[in-house]
Structures are given as structure tokens and as C-alpha cells.
Amino acid sequence: MSHSPADLLITSCTVLVHDDQERIRFEQDAAIVVRDGLVESVTSAADVADVVGLAVVERIDARGQVALPGLINCHTHAPMVALRGLAEDLPTEEWFNDVVWPVESNLTEKDVELGARLACAEMIRAGVTCFADHYFSMDTVAAVVAECGIRAHLGEAYFSSQGPQGREKSLEFALRHRDTADGRITTALAPHAPYTVTDADLATTARLALEHGLPVHIHAAENRDQTDTSLSRHGVTPIEVLDRADLLDTDLLIAHGTGVIDRDLPVLERASGRTAVATAPRGYLKFAWPGTTPIRALRAIGIPVGLATDGAASNNSLDVWESMALTSLIQKSTEGDPRWLTSRQALHHATLQSARAVGLGDSIGSIAPGRRADIVLVDLTGPHTRPVHDLAATLVHSARSADVRTTIVDGRVLMRDRELLTLDVPAVVRELEKRLPALVDRSHGRRIQEYDT
């Protein structure tokens, strides 16, 4: 044990920990010692003085608070916060074709930068310490991530309509930014979806991913309509399209999967790569999709399901806390079983399952020695969280993202007592709002793509 000062000492908190069976439990009156960006130990408050010899650079007294692993947004389009509330009460096809894809044809790097800044501020304030992003002008997003201190898994999205250069740009981005920002940025290849990327491009993406050791992040089987259309046009489901292109041999993150059907399950179970799914339930409700991600069936075949928000243009927020509560409730309703998905299961999806989904299951997702110190402190002293009979239920169904007091990534405090330390939100909002008229103009009649599944 080093006798040099620890970087950070969090005392007098309750800590969510995982046992060797990955069951969640809570250690009361605990302390967390952080050194060199890692959790060095989780110990009792009484023993902490012996552990660090009282030498510590920064202390946080977390009385009345619960320390959780930082939440992970497993699939979003961060810069789309600039379009929050622009395309409301529309079916999926009209949402894409009439509003979002025409507006996205106006996007500049500056719009993306400001959207990314606002999104990172929103996520840090909501206890999100890592996000998986799938968008355009991702060099700009990477720069924002490096500057503000959050963790991110980034992919430059592409459509086959861009020609080979779209795919090549996605690869160049992934290789250039892999393991940058002191290791906080990981990267993926990011084909948009089987209905916007040809089978040949999907197969080439799989080959490039395996050749360069890169994961792939893609939308697939987003809803049942897509699956039905794929079956009627091609005789295969979107998941079978991915399999045919060898993408299930890569480490693959599938966004949404509410259109996954029974015949897809053996295909996914046979996958030789690390396959995961991200679920973003609020958007499914808004679009009136008939189903949700089949978490129970996916869990039964060993597929991790992480929590996500999708972009704020469809979800209206980047609040993974809300995704956690909605996931539990919608799964109960869909399965007709109040015993599934429990609060503890929801917390497991929000922590270790989400970490696995973004390929970081060995380094984040739990508070334990040797893990990266991505930690959020949640204040449970408010009237809406008292009394506490079941701490897991209180966290999932009573607490809100606004109860997050402090957000820490890699041992660095990014928000303390609700004050953001690395981003200037009023300045971002002022600049973004000046740019909105040009951004939202649709009079040009262009769109970056056609939604026709």
C-alpha cells in the first residue's frame, strides 16, 4: 500500500458493491480511497484513517449519500440535444424524413460542438460518467470529451449513400481516437443500420473491425416494423442480416432491438463476438412502438442489455436514471410479472451490464479495488426518498437524477454539490440559441437520407 497522499477520500457514505456472484449489496458507513484514477479500497469509515494515514489531497464528506458506479448511457446521439423538442408527436418515418434528416443536413461542426457540450453537461449533472455516441463530426465530440473529463465510446456514423468515403472516415476516426484523452475515449465503427448500409458495406465493416480489433455500434431491429419489412423484402430479419455480414463475429453493440423476434435468439446466442444490446425505453413509448427490448429473453441467452436514452430529439432528455426506472416498469408490464424486472436487476443493468455493453466491463461498472474511479454520490435526504425500507427500490423508483450531488470520472470531480466544474452552460446556451434559426431551417428541401424500411 502506498504511503503517498491519496487523490480523493470519500467518507461516511453507503456504497453499492457487487459480490462474487454479481449480486448487489450495500455497505453502510463506508469510505472509498481513490489513487491515480483508480479505486484503491472500499473500507469502513472507522478503518479509513489507518488506510491512508490521513494524507489525502481532496476529501468529500458524503453523509446521507449513496455512492454508485457512474451511470452509462449505452446509446445516444449527444449533439442532437440541439434538436430537443423539434420533432414531436410524429410516427418514426415522418420524424426522420420530414424533420430530423432535413435539419441534420444543415449541421456544422460548431453546432455539433455546442450540442456535445450541452449534452455532456446534462449527463454529468444526471450522474452519467460514460456515454456511447453514434453521430457525425465526431472529432469535435472527442475534443469536447477530452476537455470536460467525461468518459465516452465514440463512433463516426455513416450511410452507404455517402460512398466508400463514409466507411473510410468512420475507420479513420476510430483508429485516430482510440484510447485517447488519457484512455477515457474508446472507439467503434458506426454503420447506421441495415436499412441504410448495404450488405456489402456491412461485410466490409465486419472485416475491418476484426482486422483492426475494433468493436461495431449499429442500430438494428429497432422496431417490429423494420423486422417485418426486412422479412417481406429479403426473407431475413435485421439480426440475420448482421449475421450474414459476419458482424456477429465482432464485438457488436446493437441499439434498441425491440424488433428482435424468437427466431433471432439462437442466432444471437451463437454469436462468436461479444454481442450486447442497448435499450432506450422512453423513445419507444413516444413513437408508440408496440414492443420493447426483450431483456428477459436476451438475458437468458447471455446477452448483456445496457441502459440508454437515444438522442434528445426523440427522448427529450439524456436522463439514464429515468431509463432505469422506465426499464423496470415497462418490463414488468410487458412480461405481466411484477417480480421482473426488480430494482436490484435494474441497478445491475445500469452498472455492470451497461459497462459490458460498451466493452468496458473490466474497468468500470462497479466500485471495487482496481476499477476506474467513476463514481456518483446520490443525496437521499430529501422528503421524496424517505424513509428507506428498501434502498435499491428507493434508488430506482424514488430518487431522481437531480439527487446526484457529485460526479467523479477517473478520480476527477466534474460536479461537486451540483456545481459543474468543467463546462460553462450559460455560455453554450447563448451561442447555440444564436445558431438555431439556421440549424432548423427546412426550406431547402434537402435531407441527408431517406427513411424507408
Image: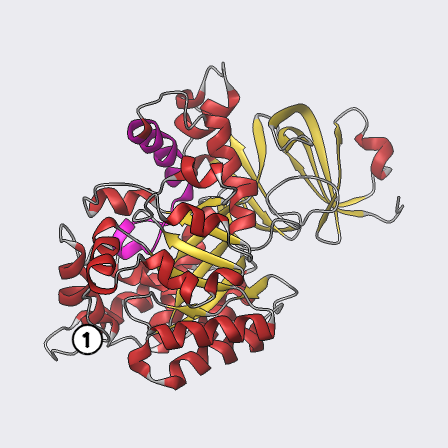
> Residue 399 in the image: x percent, y percent?
43, 29
On the picture, is 235 further left or further right than 119?
left
Q: Quadrant of the C terminus?
A: bottom left
Which residue is at 37% across, 36% downward?
327
Query: What span is colored magenta in the figure?
Result: 309-334
Task: Please tell me whether residue 195 is drawn above or below residue 314 in the rendered image.
Answer: below
Residue 77 seen in the current view: no
* Residue bearing mark 1: 447
Viewer-side residue, 212 vs 4: 212
Q: Quadrant of residue 176?
A: bottom right
What colouring method underlies this structural image? secondary structure
Residue 372 seen in the current view: yes
- Residue 51 in the magenta stretch? The answer is no
Viewer-side residue, 192 vs 275: 275
Count of picture labels: 1
Q: Quadrant of the N terminus?
A: top right
- Secondary element at image label 1: loop
- Residue 320 in the magenta stretch? The answer is yes
> Residue 238 in the image: x percent, y percent?
32, 59
On the picture, is 343 further left or further right than 28?
left
Q: Residues within 10 Å of mark 1 (few under 14, many from 20)?
A: some
On the picture, is 370 further left or further right than 358?
right
Which residue is at 45% across, 77% downward?
204
Q: Residue furthest front?
A: 235
> Residue 340 in the image: x percent, y percent?
41, 26
Q: Amino acid at mark 1?
A: Arg
Prevailing secondary structure of the magenta residues: helix
> Residue 243 in the image: x percent, y percent?
43, 61
